[in-house]
Amino acid sequence: MSGIRIQNQDFDPAAEIAALTADHTDIGAVVTFTGVVRGDGGLRVMTLEHYPGMTEREIARHIDEAKTRWPLAGVTVVHRVGRLSPGDQIVLVACASSHRAAAFAAVEFLMDYLKTRAPFWKYEERADGGTWVDARPADDRAAKRWE
Amino acid sequence: MKILYFAWLRQKIGRAEESFDLPAGISTVEALVAALRARGPGYAEAFKDLSRIKAAVNQEHVAFDAPVAASDEVAFFPPVTGG
């Protein structure tokens, strides 16, 4: 089972874990990553834009790729778009597997690819105005280690 | 063809999407960019530096030498910053 949701509203990691493991007795590990908006440098508002359609396709492709690399019983990816404030949850990746090593690795893999391939863009507003966030070379390096 | 612009490309060009009649002889993303640059100052500014831009054809990442056809959906955007 895998689920991909792009949404404005907040999410509840506990509810996502419960949904992932419902009706399963073969799952021994669920690893979740929750990304949170950091209030760096006086950040007031972060607005996320995405490419509807391509976003879901890119994420689905990488979930399929993760499933060829590790034995996964389920994957959930939730990514928020729209206006967010410091402290808000922004992204959730949850992977369920029979054993923890696969679940840990798959979450890292999916996050690295979300950062570098999924078509989202962040716009940050501070007291002195707004700027589009630049891509980080460190994120590209993190994704490259899976090649 | 349908062309989509995201993030600061959308702002510089002043629209999120448009339909564009692909001129004869244009068969790659790079050639399409050259044709778009000529459409006005906003386009010229948005497409000034290709090293700051990514492209997708039919919702898949592509390089600038990738082929384009009249029925394609093409998108231009800065390097992605989600997660």
Image (tube, coloured by chain):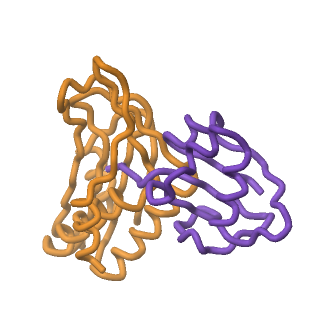
Chain colours: A orange, B purple
Q: Please give left or right for residue A25 compared with residue A130 in the image.
A: left
For the image, the number of numbered tags is 0
Q: Which residue is at the front of the view, A101 or A131?
A: A131
The N terminus of chain A - image quarter: bottom left
- Which residue is situated farthest in the top direction here? A127
Q: Quadrant of residue A128?
A: top left
- Picture coordinates of residue B16, whole percent (x, y): 63, 40
The C terminus of chain A - image quarter: bottom left
Q: Please give left or right for residue A120 compared with residue B55 in the image.
A: left
> In this rendering, does residue A24 appear at all?
no
Residue visible at 21% across and 30% down in the picture: A87
Q: Please give left or right for residue A99 compared with residue B15 in the image.
A: left
- Picture coordinates of residue B18, whole percent (x, y): 73, 44
Residue visible at 20% across and 71% down in the picture: A105
- Picture coordinates of residue A95, whole percent (x, y): 27, 63
Q: Which residue is at the front of the view, A110 or A46?
A: A46
Q: State whether residue A72 is above or below residue A128.
A: below
Residue visible at 57% across and 53% down in the picture: B76
Q: State whether residue A90 is above or below residue A142.
A: above
Q: Quadrant of residue A123?
A: top left
- Picture coordinates of residue A69, whole percent (x, y): 30, 81
Q: Quadrant of residue A142?
A: bottom left
Q: State whether residue B28 is above or below residue B9.
A: below
Residue visible at 35% across and 76% down in the picture: A67
> In this rendering, does residue A32 appear at all?
yes
